[in-house]
Image: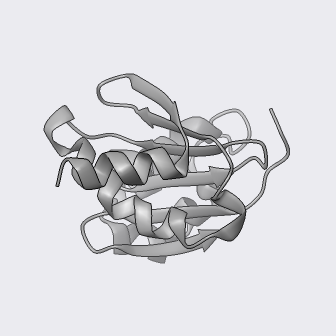
């Protein structure tokens, strides 16, 4: 795995995004968790997890409430979300403007992982934009 670059959480319902150092630390912040719809009881449960061993479970809590996790690894961009297939294009349409606004992402392969359908695709930003435009 390459070294980590920029990270973002994106709410595709509002198009609001937050730049993060680590996705898990951002989710463990009670104010952030509440703002994105993680229940108090779920947040309490997350804070009891081991932040190293259970980092993926903590991140997954954000994805489960509908957020899109974006992380640059310099040699690739990772985009993760969980949506039923009919909503996939809508989620990617929401993520595209943020991805397109970051100059260093222009020529970097994007690994898109839909954690609900278990579908993955590697695509360029240009190809993603053309695909989204084609199926408007």
Q: Quadrant of the C terminus?
A: bottom left
Q: Is residue 125 shown left or right of residue 102?
A: left
Q: In the depicted view, which residue is nearer to us: 106 or 94?
A: 106
Q: Is there any visible trace of residue 124 in the rendered image?
A: yes
Residue located 80% across and 32% down the image:
1
Report the coloring of the rendering: one colour
x and y, in percent, of residue 30 in the image: 48, 71
Q: Quadrant of residue 51?
A: top right
x and y, in percent, of residue 109 in the image: 63, 41
Residue located 46% across and 44% down the image:
127
Residue located 38% across and 56% down the image:
67
Q: Quadrant of residue 104?
A: bottom right
User: Height in image: 97 above or below 125?
Assistant: below
Residue located 46% across and 73% down the image:
17
Q: In the depicted view, which residue is nearer to us: 15 or 134?
A: 134
Q: Is there any visible trace of residue 91 in the rendered image?
A: no
x and y, in percent, of residue 113 in the image: 45, 33
x and y, in percent, of residue 130 in the image: 37, 50
User: Height in image: 49 above or below 37?
Assistant: above
Q: Is residue 117 shown left or right of residue 80?
A: left
């Amino acid at each position: 795995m390459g070294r980590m670059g920029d990270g973002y959480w994106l709410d595709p319902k509002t198009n609001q995004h937050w730049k993060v150092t680590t996705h898990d630390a951002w989710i463990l912040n009670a104010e952030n968790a509440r703002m994105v719809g993680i229940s108090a009881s779920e947040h309490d449960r997350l804070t009891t997890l081991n932040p190293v061993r259970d980092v993926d479970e903590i991140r997954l809590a954000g994805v489960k409430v509908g957020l899109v996790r974006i992380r640059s690894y310099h040699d690739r961009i990772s985009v993760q979300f969980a949506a039923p297939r009919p909503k996939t294009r809508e989620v990617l349409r929401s993520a595209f403007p943020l991805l397109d606004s970051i100059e260093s992402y222009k020529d970097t392969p994007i690994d898109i992982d839909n954690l609900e359908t278990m579908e993955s695709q590697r695509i360029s930003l240009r190809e993603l934009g053309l695909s989204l435009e084609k199926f408007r």
